[in-house]
Each structure stands twice: as structure tokens, then as C-alpha cells.
Image: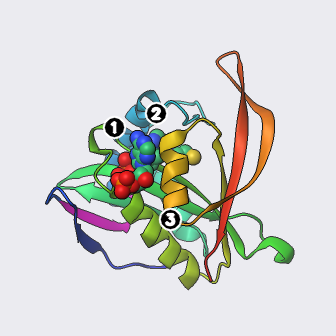
Amino acid sequence: MVTMNSKKILLANNEELLVRTLDTNDSELHVDFSNKIYDESAYLFQVDTSKNTIEKSSAIINRFKDAPRNFAIGAFIEQELAGLIYIWEVSTIKLYNKNCDLGISVRKSHRGKGIAKALMLEAEDQAKASDYKRLQFSVVSTNEPAIQLYKKLGYSEEGLRKSSIFFNDEYLDELFMGKIIS
Ligand SMILES: CC(C)(COP(=O)(O)OP(=O)(O)OC[C@H]1O[C@@H](n2cnc3c(N)ncnc32)[C@H](O)[C@@H]1OP(=O)(O)O)[C@@H](O)C(=O)NCCC(=O)NCCS
């Protein structure tokens, strides 16, 4: 993982945001974040539904720390983890190893303050430093806040996989988006 110094950002509402790589010491904040974020987010699906624990959070953080081209970046307001972005290598197969994927979320109480934008920009810098050429991901096609965020930052719609997600007895379309970053 690329090591990153912490960065202080003054948000438009004058709150100070600290953006930095997650460390094992953040496990308690991470487990609290994980326990709340899925209930607060209509289109965030918990793939691993086993109980969130500090041990599990430590393992996730360490897995990102130990992987050479993956990283987990947190956005902190005072002592709270307000937002989180993960970046990971799509494939170690050489044909695709210039592509990375991402997952981002911000606690409901901190949305609309510019935190996701700050995290995305930091992630792009880290991705460039890790020799990636493309950032790519998918989003549920009705997740307007996320789609607007990505479009604002220059990501393009690349395709639609119809009815690919089955959630709460409903079929959802998956929109693929991406951006060349270097
Ligand atoms: C999508 C999400 C990460 C945005 O986080 P955020 O910190 O509120 O976003 P920001 O304040 O940085 O907003 C940046 C831009 O995103 C867009 N945006 C954010 N929220 C929006 C909303 N509710 N409606 C429309 N556009 C929105 C706007 O273009 C905004 O720029 P502006 O404020 O200049 O208009 C947040 O809503 C979230 O965590 N959602 C649940 C998890 C999720 O869906 N993650 C994405 C999965 S693919």
C-alpha cells in the first residue's frame, strides 16, 4: 500500500477534515462505522453479513495495509470516522492490472459537506502514485447522489447491466462508470 501523510482540509462549513490512511488503531472506529453505514445507505449492500467485530475490522485494515496496491482511506472529523474509501486492484493479471475499483461511503450525519469529493480526489492521487491508469466501478442506476458525485468528478457512464442485482425482492440495474486518471 502507498503510505500517505495525513492531510487537513477545511470544509465549506468550516469544519476541519483529516484525510489519512486507516491504521489498525482505527479498528474501533471502523467497526462502529461498519455497524451503522449499511442501515443509513439505501444502495450499500453488505456482502459479508457475519457480525462486525474489532478483530474483523483489524483484519480488513491490515489486509489493505499489506497489499501493495490497495488502500483504505478514512475521513475524520474530530475523533469520528465520517467517511471511508477503499481502492483495490481489479486483477493481478497483467492485462488488467492498471485498473482499480473503489467503494465509498459517508456517514449520513456528515453528507453534503464535501467529504466524498475530498476522499475521491485523495484516492485518485493515491491511485496515480500506485501506477494505475483507470478507476472503474459500478453503481446501482438509481443511486443519484453517488452518480452525480462521480459525474461531477469526470467519470463517464460505460454501460448498463440490466437487472443484475437482486435485493429486497427487486431487480436493480448496475451502471458501470470509469475514468482514465493518468
Ligand atoms: C454518495 C455519497 C458517498 C456522497 O457523499 P457526500 O459526502 O454527501 O458527497 P459530497 O458532499 O462530497 O458531494 C459532492 C458532489 O456529489 C453530488 N451529490 C452529493 N450528494 C448528492 C445528492 N443527495 N443529490 C445529488 N447530488 C449529490 C453533488 O454533485 C456534490 O457536489 P455539490 O455539493 O457541489 O453539488 C453519500 O451519499 C453516501 O455515502 N451514500 C451511501 C453510500 C453509497 O451509496 N456509496 C456509493 C456506492 S456506489
Q: Does 49 appear above or below 95?
A: above
Q: Nearer the viewer, residue 7 or 160?
A: 160
Marks 2/3: CA–CA distance: 21 Å
Q: Which mark is residue 153?
A: 3
Residue 100 position in % (x across, y down):
66, 67
Q: Quadrant of residue 36?
A: top left
Which residue is found at the position 44% from the left and 79% from the top? Answer: 3
Q: How many marks?
A: 3
- Asked if the beta carbon under badge 1 is closer than 8 A to the nearest atom of ligand 1, the reply is yes
Which residue is found at the position 54% from the left and 37% from the top? Answer: 44
Q: Does 97 appear above or below 30?
A: below
Is the residue under label 2 in contact with that under label 1 (CB below 8 Å)?
Answer: yes
Is the residue under label 1 in contact with that under label 3 (CB below 8 Å)?
Answer: no
Q: Which residue is mark 1?
A: 108
Which amino acid type corresponds to the residue marked 2 in the rendered image? Answer: Ser
Residue 154 position in % (x across, y down):
56, 66
Queried whether the magenta region covers residue 20, the answer comes back as yes
Characterize the local packing of mark 2: few (<14), some (14-19) or many (20 or more) Cα atoms within 10 angstroms: some
Please tell me which of labels 1 and 2 falls first in the chain. 2
Q: Which mark is residue 41?
A: 2
Which amino acid type corresponds to the residue marked 3 in the rendered image? Answer: Leu
- Asked if the beta carbon under badge 3 is closer than 8 A to the nearest atom of ligand 1, the reply is yes
- Asked if the beta carbon under badge 2 is closer than 8 A to the nearest atom of ligand 1, the reply is yes
Q: Is residue 103 left or right of residue 78?
A: right
Q: Which residues are magenta?
A: 16-24
Which residue is found at the position 50% from the left and 30% from the top? Answer: 42
Queried whether the magenta region covers residue 35, the answer comes back as no
